[in-house]
Image (cartoon, grey):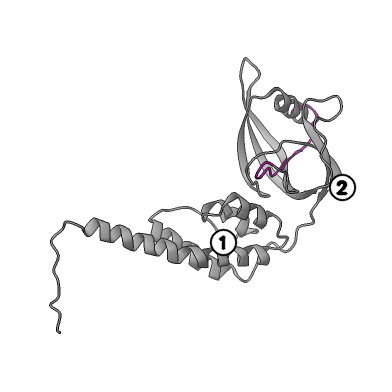
């Protein structure tokens, strides 16, 4: 399905179902958001990486206007809806301050995967090593989207995940990433332990030569 969207390029990745709070201060985006609020229409956040638009983004819905400042700035709450592929980009749209373009909405693939147990096992190992806690529910659909920002992906890797159409593909991508990351994190933790022990009295076992 193709549609025309006002576009708000950002150097970040937003996934379907994700909540994103934005502070709107530029005149062009104040105009964009005001029109979305007045006409109850959506806008798109195409990923802007390394000073270019690689082509994928997420359609967004303005959930609420949290605060409007006297000078016109706004704090808004938005939610990701659907992944899209950018067909063309017009900056600015004729008669507007903001950019826009034609997009093709990506039909969502399967939202559950049999790889979830293997993924959760690795996520838990990572969090144990880092000694951090976070809430997640692997029983929810599109689990990969819900943890993608929480496993140390680069922006480029987060973008690659956005281009994958099924949950199975995305979970396998995250599993491979964690397979690469976990040994590095584990070694860092061992290094930290050695540093902590430096200067302490140690009980050393005698060596037999």
Q: From the viewer's perspective, tell me whether residue 206 is left or right of residue 38.
A: left
* Label 1 packing within 10 angstroms: few (<14), some (14-19), many (20+): some
Q: Nearest the camera: 121 or 149?
A: 149
At horizontal 67% and vertical 41% (from top left) the residue drawn is 51
User: Are circles 2 and 1 on residues that touch, CB within 8 Å?
Assistant: no
Report how far apart the C-alphas of labels 2 and 1 lie in the structure: 32 Å
Q: Quadrant of residue 30?
A: top right
Mark 1 residue element: loop
Q: Residue at x 43, y 63 (%)?
A: 184
Residue found at the very far top of the displayed protein: 70
The residue drawn where x is 56% and y is 51% is 149
Does residue 38 sit above or below 150 in this rendering? above
Dot 2 crowding, Cα within 10 Å, few <14, some 14–19, many 20+: few
x then y, percent, for residue 64: 66, 32
Q: Which residues are magenta?
A: 37-51
- Circle number at residue 138: 1
Q: Is residue 45 visible?
A: yes
Picture quarter with the C terminus: bottom left
Relative to residue 150, is residue 76 drawn left or right?
Answer: right
The residue that disc 2 covers is 2
């Amino acid at each position: 399905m193709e549609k025309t969207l006002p576009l708000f390029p950002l150097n970040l990745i937003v996934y379907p179902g994700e909540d994103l709070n934005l502070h709107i201060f530029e005149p062009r985006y104040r105009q964009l958001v005001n029109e979305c609020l007045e006409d109850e229409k959506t806008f798109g956040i195409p990923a802007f990486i390394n000073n270019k638009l690689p082509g994928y983004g997420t359609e967004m819905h303005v959930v609420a206007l949290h605060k409007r400042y006297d000078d016109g700035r706004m704090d808004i709450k938005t939610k990701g809806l659907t992944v899209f592929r950018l067909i063309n980009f017009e900056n600015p749209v004729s008669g507007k301050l903001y950019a826009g373009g034609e997009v093709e909405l990506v039909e969502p693939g399967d939202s559950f995967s049999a790889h979830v147990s293997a993924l959760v096992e690795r996520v838990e190992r990572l969090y144990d090593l880092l000694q951090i806690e976070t809430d997640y529910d692997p029983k929810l659909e599109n689990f990969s989207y819900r943890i993608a920002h929480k496993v140390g992906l680069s922006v480029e890797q987060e973008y690659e995940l956005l281009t994958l159409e099924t949950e199975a593909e995305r979970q396998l991508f995250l599993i491979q990433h964690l397979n690469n990351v976990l040994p590095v994190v584990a070694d860092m933790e061992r290094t930290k332990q050695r540093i902590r022990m430096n200067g302490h009295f140690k009980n050393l076992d005698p060596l037999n030569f």
